[in-house]
Amino acid sequence: MPILFVILAGAAVYAVLTIIAVWRFLRVHRAVASFLEPVSILKPLAGLDLDLEDNLRSFFELDYPSFEILFAVRDAFDPAVAVVERLRAEYEHVSTRLLITGEPTYANAKVFSLDRMLAAAAHDLVVMSDSDIRVGRDFLRAVAAEFEDPELGVATCPYRAIAGPGPWSKLEALGMNTDFLAGVLVARMLEGMQFAVGPTIVARRGALRSIGGFDRLKDYLAEDFVLGKFAAQAGHGVSLSSAVVEHHIGGSGFFANAAHRIRWARSTRRSRPWGYVGQIFTMPLPLAIALVAADPSNWPYALAAVALRFAAAYAVSARVLRARVNWLLLPFEDVAAFGFWAAGFFGNTIEWRGRRYLLHPDGRFELIPTAD
């Protein structure tokens, strides 16, 4: 039981640090761009995500004087092609290109698509954004202002998870909105941004070139994390942007959702192993339950730790992401997150877009050939 006290106390400290980190992030002055430089937006596509057309439409409707959108699919029969063509016909004034890449030659198919699009892109400032992302009309103005800092090479955009239909999607979105960004904010406060995360990253072409380009990222599952890590090591500034995007996560059932979350857990464990172990401090509710189960008289300590966790969840979700917190579901998500975290310690394979991969200890991965 003493070890539970220590870990629960650590969880309470982490919650306090999260609240302080939120306050520090919100105090940062948000600049207004004096020069709106041209931007290239890179969109790798694979199939029909839920609400794909609305997600892509938000990029066509950006309030910005000069930008282009590049899309990449493996073949012309991908159903996403029809969606892109409808939008291109509707927004003829927006500069767009659609690339047919063929089968990826990289382990990370997304990186393969990004590499092909970057080679065709016209501008120095590049936005890499997944197909399930939706943005506000002022998104590019916000990031352009931040990149007027000549030291900045890479910026990570915080994301507000939008759940699809189904309880598992709602739980996952709640966890993303209350836990994921909290870890980023605390890391930013304690050691600065030494990594990038998330489904939308903005970068200078020169920063990408200096780290060896996408060719250096092709064998990593968490290519976003190592992109920021390599950029920081190369001396470029890496920041957490003020531009919040929406991440529409779909509405998969339990088994698909569990596979996704375990894949994410196994990837994180290899990208930052000690940070993954430290995630135990982000889950005080299961610890509090165990502490009270061991000795019911410990309930005041457990209650205090859980109250701090709820306060931190509110600070991140409501104050930074402007997302509502479902307080009734939050305890269930905390318990579920603990289970997926524990499961992440086991296994070295993942399923991703119908293919099976082997994970290596350094975060690299490779396709497991299937028998014909």
Image: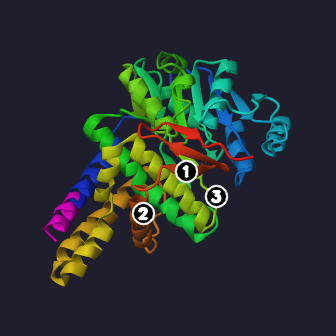
Q: Position of residue 330 (x, y in %)?
A: 42, 69
Q: In this view, does 129 lie above or below 216?
A: below
User: Is label 1 in contact with label 3 (beta carbons under 8 Å)?
Assistant: no
Q: Give the range drawn in magenta.
A: 1-10
Q: Is residue 103 above or below residue 172?
A: above
User: Is label 2 in contact with label 1 (beta carbons under 8 Å)?
Assistant: no
Q: How many marks?
A: 3
Q: Where is residue 241 in the image (x, y as percent from the top left)?
A: 45, 36
| For marks 2 and 1 on the same chain, the one whose residue lies earlier in the sequence | 2
| For marks 1 and 3 on the same chain, the one whose residue lies earlier in the sequence | 3
Gap in angstroms between the C-alphas marked 2 and 1: 18 Å
Left or right of 229 in this view: 76: right
User: Residue at horizontal 36%, vertical 56%?
Assistant: 315
User: Residue at horizontal 81%, vertical 40%?
Assistant: 81
Between disc 1 and disc 3, the foreground one is 1
Between disc 2 and disc 1, the foreground one is 1
Q: Label 3: which residue?
A: 250
Q: What element carries label 1?
A: strand
Q: Label 1: which residue?
A: 350
Q: Quadrant of residue 7?
A: bottom left
Q: Is residue 253 visible?
A: yes
Q: In this view, does 351 lie above or below 225?
A: below
Q: Does the magenta stretch include residue 293?
A: no
* Furthest-front residue in this view: 371
Report crowding for label 3: few under 14, some 14 to 19, many 20 or more residues within 10 A (C-alpha).
many
Q: What element carries label 2?
A: helix
Q: Label 2: which residue?
A: 337
Name the amino acid type tagged 2: Ala
Q: Does the magenta stretch include residue 9?
A: yes
Report crowding for label 1: few under 14, some 14 to 19, many 20 or more residues within 10 A (C-alpha).
many
Name the amino acid type tagged 1: Ile
Between disc 2 and disc 3, the foreground one is 2
